[in-house]
Image (cartoon, rainbow, N blue to C red):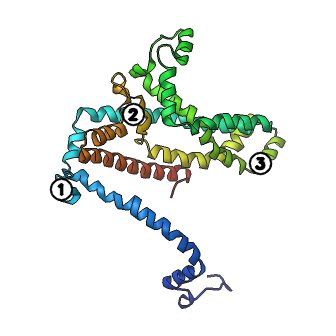
Amino acid sequence: MAAGAKTTPARLQPTLGKRIRRDLSRYKYVYIMLIPIVVWYILFCYRPLLGNVIAFKDYKASKGIWGSPWVGIKHFTAFFSSFYFWRVLRNTLLISLYGIIFSFPAPILLALLMNEMHSRWYKSTVQTITYMPYFISMIVICGMLMDFLKMDGVITTILAVLGMPNENYLMKPEAFRTIYVASDIWQNCGWNSIIYMAALSSIDQELYEAAAIDGANRFKQTLHVTLPGLLPTIMILLIIRIGAVLNVGYEKIILLYNSANADTSDVISSFVYRYGMQKGNYSYATAVGLFNSLFNFILLVAVNAFSRKVSEISLW
């Protein structure tokens, strides 16, 4: 140890109990305000998780959760060996992959473009137009898609002028994923760009001035200053997005679902809804949902560890 360095004797350092009492005394009002939030999470978020035990039982409403017979992994085995397993897994992964490839970069590109807008009025107008679809109800969105994509719909008519077949595209299985992802981009691109706009505002302007002095044009400034400044935000959101790869929302799927496009539109969440809510097979549906959650959790941990190893950016 270097000469003159001072150390605090162990006996003078406050114990864990003293530190806790000191923090409770200092921030007592903060902890009091946290009590309702903690109670709410325990009662409405964590306590219901106990119901997942029915995935290992043959649940009967008349017998209740704890009175229903234990069947182990029967429902998991039934799902893995069923005809629908590979279909819903394939559809879920493909729709998520399309989303990661096309939907995820869209708000980044929009934020970069708006960052280059110097007219305050024009920038505000673009932001308003792109944010508005986010606040439209999903039922309205799906109603618009059904109306626009029918035989004489607006989009169908435009596609027919461009040489595409004049038909109801929601009845074509091969078109469903494109429709789903394209409508998702239109609805959420503007809203999702807000967090990237916030990240852009935190980049030091002196870096741009230094790059300009070195002769960098706007493209090179974007490449060497803007994108590195956005990288931590992009990586965190990408980790979260990949970690939720099986979480394809069932609302739009259910509303656009029909017997003609079922081969490409049926995903895990819609499968759980159909078997749980419509058929009343709660144990089977819970088993499928539990598989979904465990798969996402394992993937999130793996992707987070990989990101921390290669880029030192991670959730924890």
N-terminal of the two: label 1 or label 3?
A: 1
Residue type at mark 2: give it: Ile
Mark number, residue 206: none
Q: Residue at x 25, y 39 (%)?
A: 279
Determine the secondary structure under disc 1: loop
Q: CA distance from mark 3 to mark 2?
A: 48 Å
**Contact flag, marks 1 and 3 (Cβ < 8 Å):** no
Q: CA distance from mark 2 to mark 1?
A: 31 Å
Percent position (x, y) of residue 109?
Answer: 64, 35
Q: Residue at x 29, y 43 (%)?
A: 276
Residue type at mark 3: give it: Leu
Residue for badge 3: 207
- For the N terminus, the quadrant is bottom right
Residue 1 appears left or right of 212: left
Residue for badge 1: 63
Residue type at mark 1: give it: Lys
Percent position (x, y) of residue 11?
Answer: 53, 91
Q: Residue at x 49, y 84 (%)?
A: 17
| 2 or 1: mark nearer the eye | 1
N-terminal of the two: label 2 or label 1?
A: 1
Residue for badge 2: 254
Mark 1 Cα within 10 Å, few/some/many (few <14, many 20+)?
few
Residue 123 appears left or right of 240: right
Determine the secondary structure under disc 2: helix
Q: Residue at x 31, y 37 (%)?
A: 274
N-terminal of the two: label 3 or label 2?
A: 3
| 3 or 2: mark nearer the eye | 2
Above or below: residue 170 compared with residue 244: above
Percent position (x, y) of residue 171?
Answer: 40, 19
Q: CA distance from mark 1 to mark 3?
A: 67 Å
Above or below: residue 59 compared with residue 141: below
